[in-house]
Amino acid sequence: MSQAIRIAEFEDLSPAVRAFISKPRRLYINGEWVDGHSGKEIELWNPVTGKQDGILQTPVGQTPVDVRYDRTGTRLLVLGNDLTVQIWDVDRRKPVGRPIPVPSLSDVQGLDADGYLVLVEPTEVTDAFQLAFWDMAAGRQSGAVRLSTTYPGIYPVSDDGTHVRLTAKGGALPIAFPLTAAQWVEQLCRFTDRPFSAEEQGLLPPGVGVEQPCPPH
């Protein structure tokens, strides 16, 4: 069972971090939204007993500003004000691996079904954001997708890790945005079921097959 999270209050915030956390922070746990706050340590609370189960003491200089459980409820994804993301083993109360540097303050959405960390990152365009996919083992970004400003509302990664729900403005319908490589291949092959062109083949990296990308029907 996942635990509710509270981050103990602190005062030594940079202006950028203050601006980032001034908006309400909410955590989606076991089908319910739970209030979250920013601070120097992460308190773990049992939502059934209402009692504190433990504390994750973050290192000096890695003050948490955004946190989210993974789908198993056993790992916690923590964005620090030092612009790193650290995975914590909740049961052992210990960090897993090294913190991964990220380029900006972001919203942590969770881990997708392929195991990538999904962040919502700002772009150079005002009020425009991108979904960024981070390989936690390699410590680098594997790709990013710019989101339309028509969809300003972004929900956490789904329980099965295959999509995020984007809510729309202006009367547009919400969509389930696919996250995994297999889903993208399936979607793209619906529209481009043909061999690579000569120009496209020239863009492929060495070692990649140049045969027809979509499997035969």
Image (cartoon, grey):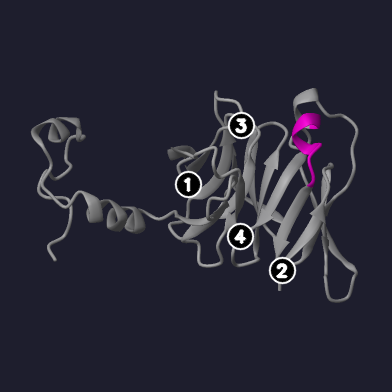
Residue that label 2 marks: 2
Quadrant in which the N terminus is drawn: bottom right
Residue that label 4 marks: 70
Residue that label 1 marks: 137
Cα distance in 3D space between marks 3 and 1: 30 Å
Q: Is residue 114 left or right of residue 68?
A: left
Cα distance in 3D space between marks 2 and 4: 10 Å
Q: Nearer the viewer, mark 1 or mark 4?
A: 4
Please determine whether, in this image, residue 33 is positioned above or below residue 145. below
Determine the secondary structure under disc 4: loop
Determine the secondary structure under disc 2: loop
Cα distance in 3D space between marks 2 and 1: 24 Å
Residue 216 visible: yes
Point out the stretch of residues depicted in magenta: 18-24
**Disc marking residue 127:** 3
Q: Nearer the viewer, mark 3 or mark 1?
A: 3
Cα distance in 3D space between marks 4 and 3: 27 Å
Circles 2, 3 touching at the beta carbon (< 8 Å): no
Residue type, label 4: Asp
Residue type, label 3: Asp
Q: Nearer the viewer, mark 2 or mark 1?
A: 2
Q: Is residue 44 magenta?
A: no
Q: Residue at x 87, y 29 (%)?
A: 12
Residue 92 visible: no
Circles 2, 4 touching at the beta carbon (< 8 Å): no
Q: Nearer the viewer, mark 4 or mark 3?
A: 3
